[in-house]
Every structure is written in C-alpha cells, then in structure tokens.
Amino acid sequence: MLATTVAIVPLTWLLIGWRWPRSVSGHDGLANLLVLLQALAGEKGEWSRLAYRADFLGGMKARDAVGPFPVFSLLARWDFSPTTILDLTTFLLQVVIAFLGARAAYSLATAWAGREGRTGLLLRVAGIWACAFAPVLGWKIGAGHQTLVTGMLPFLAAFALVVAAGSGTASATLTLVAAAALTGGVLFTGHQMVLYGAIFGAPILLGAWWALGGRPRDLVLPATVVTGAALLAMPGLGGVLTHAFGTDSLRALHGMRITYSYPTAPPLDWLTSLLWARDVLRPSRPQILHHEINNPAGPMLLLLALVPWRRARALAVGLGTSAAVALLFSLNAHPLSDALLAILPPLGTFRVPTRAILPALFVLPILALAGVLLEQDRPRVRPVLTGLGAAALYLVPALVRELAGWTLATAAAFRPRRLGRLASIPAAATFFLLAAGGLAAFRERAVSFDAFPDGDALLARARHIGGEALAAQPALRSPLVRVSPSFEWPELLSNTALAAGLSSLDGYYFPQRRLVELMCSVRGQSYQPNSLLLRLPAERPSSRALFQLYDVAWRLDESGAVRPLMPTAGPAWFSSRLIRVESLPRSAISSCRCATISRRRPDSPPGSSTPTRSSPGPACRPRSTRDAPMRGSTAWRRRAAPRSRSRTSRARPIVR
C-alpha cells in the first residue's frame, strides 16, 4: 500500500495540471514558506544557523518560532531548491495521510467483518484520492498552510494505531510511519492542530477504542509509539517549548482570548460546507477568507450509512461529539465556548476556531472506505466503465458534478428502488466515482491561489534586486543595517525585501513580542498579538522612531537602487563575553542581570567605554548618530578594593 501511495500522489498532481518545477502552493506558500526555505537552503539545512536571524523582522528566533521540521532540513541538505523542497514535502505529507487513512479503514473493515478485506487497485487509488486529496486539503495546500496539515498528523497516526491494535492488524510499516508522523507533526509550527487533534479528536479516539472492544492491552502499542516519538522529538521540541513559554513569543499560552478575533463561519457558511461546490459561498464573504470558513465534506457523508453503527455505537458517539463540540466552539456558543476556554487556556492562544472540525473531516473518508470494504460481495466492479464514469464526473461543470455525486451516494447508501439501475452500482465503484468528484473539488480550491506559480523564478527576481542593492551599498551586507522597501510584490507581501536577501523590519512571520510591543506603543495602540505581517511605511512618524533604533537607514526601490533614508543610531552591538566579579558597586551588580553593553562616550578618551545596562528594547542608542563600535575595556574602581576589569574582544550583534 505504501509503495502504491508514493507513486499515485505525484501522478495525481500531474493529472490535475501541476508541472515541475512549479509550486503546488500559492499565497502563504510563496510569501512565507518559500522565503523561509530559501534561508534554510542557504544554510545547507542547518536549523541551528536559524536559531536567531537579525535580518528577519528586526531579529527573530526562526528555529524555535517555526520548529526544526526535519523534512525541510533533510531536503535542504540535498541542495534542492526552495520550491522543490515545498513540493516534495507536500507530496510526503499526502503520502502519510493516505497511507494512515487507508490502513485505518482496512483495520476497521477487518474488525467489523471478522475477516481480512480485499483491496484491489481501484479501491486503493480511490482511497488515496479520498484521503490525500480531500477537498478541504485543497484549501490548506493551495494556501500554503502545510503547517496545519502537518499538525493533523499526530491525531491521524494515533487513530490508525488505535484501530490497528484493536483489530489485530498492526504492522511494522504502520508503526514506523505513525512514529515518523507523530515526531514530525510536533516539530513544525502547526501546534494549533496538534492541540485541536488532542482535544476535539479525543472523543473519536476514545470511541474507536471502545467500539473495538475497549481492552486496556490495545492501548499499549499506541502509548508506546506516542511515548517513543515524544522522546525522539524532545531535543528539537525543547527549544520550541522554551520559546512558547518565554517572553519573546508573540502569543502567550495562557491569559489570551484571541480565538474569535478573526472572522469565523456562521451557520450559513457551515451549511455550504456540506457541498463540494465552491461557488455556493456567499458573495459578501471576502475571497481571502474562503479557505478558513469553508470546510467541504461533500456526498461522501452519505456513505457513512454503510458503516455498521450497531457494532460501532461508541465510535458514532465519539464522532458526533467531536463534530458537535467543534461546531459549537467555532460559533462561540455560550456557555460551551466559555467553559472550554476556561478549562483549556491554550485554546485562547489560537484563532480561526473553524479548524476544530478537521479531526472529524479527516476521519470521514476513512469510515466511508471502511463501509465500502464491507460491501465487497456486491456485484463486481467493471474497471473500464468505472474509469470512464470517474473521468466524466471530474470534467463536468461543478453543478452537474454536485447533483451526480449526491445521487450516486444516495443510491449506494440507501439502495432506493426509485433510482432504478443506479441502485445496483457496486459500492466500490461509487466510492471511486465520488473520489474523482472530490479530486475535482480539491483542484478547484488548490488552483484558486495563483494556480501553480513559479516560485524559484520569483525568488531569483528578488535576489537580483538584492544583488543590485548590495553592489550599490556594501554596508547592507550586515544584517544590522536595514532597508525600508518602497514597494512589495503581491506574491511575497512584506517579505519582499527579505526574499531579496536584505535585512528589514517589514516582514511576514513571527516577530518577537518586544518589537510588536514597541511598534504598538509608538502608534498609540494596545498590544496586537496577531501582528504577523508587519508593514512600516517610511512616511509615518511612528515608523521613523523604530528606524532610529533598528538602523533602517536606507530606502530600497524596485530597481534595486538604494538611497539614504534618514540618520539613525547605527548598528546595535553587545559584548562578546561577560565576566562576573565580586567588587562591582551595588548599583552595577543590580544592572548586570543581563549581558552588559559597552559603548564609547564621545567625551571619553580613546580606549575607554562606559558600562550600560541592557534594556529590554532592541538596542542601546549611542549618543553619537554614527558611533562605530570598537574594541575597548571597561574598568570599575573602588577605594580599598582590587581593580576589576571586563574585556570586550570584538563586536557582535545583540541577540534578543
């Protein structure tokens, strides 16, 4: 099954119109992920080199804010381009989703039938399409939200392990894939979905375990794999957790209520999510929100009628509970939403609560396939006719496809006599047809974001501009000397300067909390924890206050030309080492809780410097506008006490 999945996933992308070396993702895939991957590829896949980047948003802990995702690192070490890394990672995620989903369906069918089921090539392909190319994934992949897809892997792996252990169908391959999914799933920045999978997926996991016998020994395998994966991920996860609980994180894990700070889906939007069609979304809803408010299920819902619910009542209760709680939570239905946010404070750290439905949607094609596998004794499938029907369903207009899909699903699920010969179509053939219809719905959503853009060509254009700027002003090679771009490309948004290889305060990722606090303060605003995309127009006085501190001294034009913007305080620096001494005055001791910065005073003799306490801000401003950092020593003298001296061997940028 795994080998088939590895082959089918990229072939399916070719079928729906993708061509190498174009990107499968647009939107955030270009503006966000490709820029990050360009930086990682430049460091040969070494996440440690991205522990702190002064050129990202005035200084960003990239590794710990994003997570040291091992797949990115591995592919970057093999010298793949950023677009190729993104594409191959997407294929790998889909392979894992399809394999775990198909194995879970096989395990459930085996347990319910009391014998091993048969899965021919037709059903395997249909299972891959239904799981890896579900319509909701078209939104996530097309928008470049592979982080959310990755965050769902731990839940899916746990579900596959629970049903495999309960049915006695566990294998070494399944265990290894599940362990890899669990490890990688927590090492990327999709932690919202890891949390949602644990909370809203818990009823599904509990129901599946109980429906398959509820034996405690069946939990040994899942618990062992989860524990082993956690231990394996801990070296990389430690820094992520430290950052999340620290003061540099943009959002705290407690005391925040931003869940409903972004538009959510009202009941009418949830009704449109029952359909494949994208055009049924209300015109009043901005297109940029469609990928968050529309979570399509499609006619596959009706195939749940094939599941023997009398034998799986606990699973039915778990699935229903998960879906109901997710819907009520996303609608901010009081008092349920208040209770969840009070009992589970980390829920308040994440917005877009409509994503809580994803655990139920991921299980939908699995249960439908399991029900179809129980119908193998029905009339034999005719591959040629089934293939022609699938091609027709894929190519017809959306309205015709919608009507045909629901009609076929009704015929397979309920066998009404009124539908005549349609009711005699084998369930396996119907599932294949619906998988093809779902594939068309997937493509419809995936191409709505830039339609397979040439990401590498875009980055090459940006680097050309950066090269022109560096040639004109070599000082920009320092990450502490920043530019203010006079333009931005719609594909890269405020990350345009960063994609060009230049340091800037403008950017789109995870700025440090201190910068956002400072930005909001000078703008006279309250703290904005959702400030992921920063734009600092040069004409605004608040921007110029920040430019003074962060040495944004140059204006970048789209041609690559740079010109002086304004006088600044110069680059910020800190001492290369800290020496602790017992004879410092009490005031100096209290001020040395952080690293001590040495800077020269204009009225001091050459070779001397004045100790200055490290402030919580981004830099200490010298009195002279363009004081160059220099070697020096700082000496404290006290009567009747030995002299103590701290030395600064060379200048380095402040790490915050």
Image (spheres, rainbow, N blue to C red):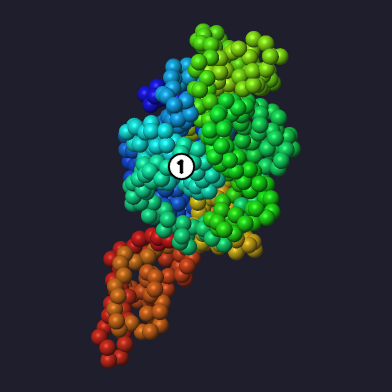
Question: Residue lying furthest bottom in this view?
Answer: 640
Residue 244 location (% of width, % of height): 46, 57
Q: Nearer the viewer, residue 125 or 559?
A: 125
Q: Nearer the viewer, residue 597 or 356?
A: 356
Residue 479 visible: no
Q: Nearer the viewer, residue 472 or 295?
A: 295
Q: Nearer the viewer, residue 110 or 142?
A: 110
Q: Residue at x 42, y 66 (%)?
A: 627
Where residue 599 sits, quadrant-wise, is bottom left
Task: State left or right for residue 401 relative to residue 514.
Answer: right
537 lies above or below 582:
above
Residue 524 location (% of width, % of height): 64, 63
Residue 178 location (% of width, % of height): 39, 38
Q: Residues within 10 Å of mark 1 (few under 14, many from 20)?
A: some
Residue 248 visible: yes
Q: Residue at x 42, y 33 (%)?
A: 167
Residue 93 location (% of width, % of height): 44, 34
Q: Secondary structure at mark 1?
A: loop
Q: Residue at x 31, y 70 (%)?
A: 578
What amino acid does circle 1 point to?
Gly
- State the residue position of label 1: 214
Q: Residue at x 27, y 88 (%)?
A: 641
335 lies above or below 111:
below
513 lies above or below 280:
below
Image quadrant in which the C terminus is located: bottom left
Number of numbered callouts drawn: 1
Task: State left or right for residue 616 relative to residue 418.
Answer: left
Image quadrant in which the N terminus is located: top left
480 lies above or below 97:
below
